[in-house]
């Protein structure tokens, strides 16, 4: 049962990240303070929904959720490394009140931790049994 705690935590975190993002976007639209362009807004909504669904899938021990989270965490970690190495830069459309550098560092550590955790043999067997 102990090996399921991490999966439970990851599932809940992904649901919270996606759900809180959706709530914040909804609130910003309703109050008229949304500053995101339609394409950025669609991207943020899509990723928030995807995060929520991945979290639900993890709680259900779905192999698809495992693979998607591992894939997206790898892509995000690579993008954070490229951003921190000043190879890639964003236009600022996704920024919020937290400084971009801080968010990149926290996101990088979070997604590196996810990759490390999900690649552990005892976790892989849960989703590949």
Image (cartoon, helix red, strand yellow):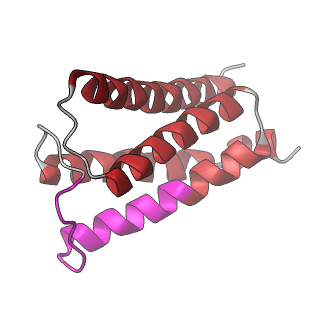
Question: In the visual, does 67 lie left or right of 70?
Answer: right
Left or right: where does residue 38 sit relative to residue 8?
A: left
Q: Which residue is drawn at the image coordinates 42% and 30% (left, top)?
A: 22
Q: How many marks?
A: 0
> Residue 124, position in %: x, y?
73, 48
Q: Residue at x 54, y 37 (%)?
A: 49
Relative to 96, residue 37 above or below: below
On the image, the x and y values in percent for residue 75 come to 47, 64
Residue at image position (37%, 31%) is: 21
Quarter containing the C terminus: top right
Q: Quadrant of the N terminus?
A: top right
Horizontal arrangement in the rendering, residue 69 relative to residue 37 (left or right) = right
Asked if residue 91 lies in the magenta stretch, the reply is: yes
Q: Position of residue 96 (x, y in %)?
A: 16, 41
Q: Quadrant of residue 62?
A: top right
Q: Is residue 120 above or below residue 23?
A: below
Q: Of residues 73 and 6, which is closer to you in this image?
A: 73
Residue farthest to the bottom, as pictured: 87
Q: Say whether residue 102 is magenta.
A: no
Residue 62 to residue 72: above or below: above
The answer to whether residue 8 is visible is: yes
Farthest right residue in view = 129
Q: Is residue 119 visible?
A: no
Query: Would you say 9 lies left or right of 128 here?
Result: left
Q: Please state the extent of the stretch shown in magenta in the rendering.
A: 72-93
> x%, y% of residue 73?
49, 54
x 38%, y 44%: residue: 110
Most foreground residue, 77 or 33: 33
**24 or 67, which lies in front?**
24
């Amino acid at each position: 049962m102990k090996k399921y705690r991490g999966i439970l935590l990851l599932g809940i975190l992904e649901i919270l990240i996606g759900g809180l993002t959706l709530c914040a976007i909804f609130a910003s639209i309703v109050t008229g303070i949304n500053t995101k362009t339609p394409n950025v807004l669609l991207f943020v909504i899509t990723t928030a929904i995807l995060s929520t669904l991945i979290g639900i899938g993890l709680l259900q021990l779905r192999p698809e959720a495992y693979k998607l989270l591992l894939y997206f965490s790898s892509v995000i970690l690579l993008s954070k490394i490229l951003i921190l190495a000043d190879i890639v830069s964003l236009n600022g459309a996704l920024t919020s009140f937290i400084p971009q550098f801080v968010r990149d560092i926290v996101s990088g550590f979070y997604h590196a931790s996810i990759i490390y955790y999900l690649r552990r043999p005892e976790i892989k067997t849960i989703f590949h049994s």
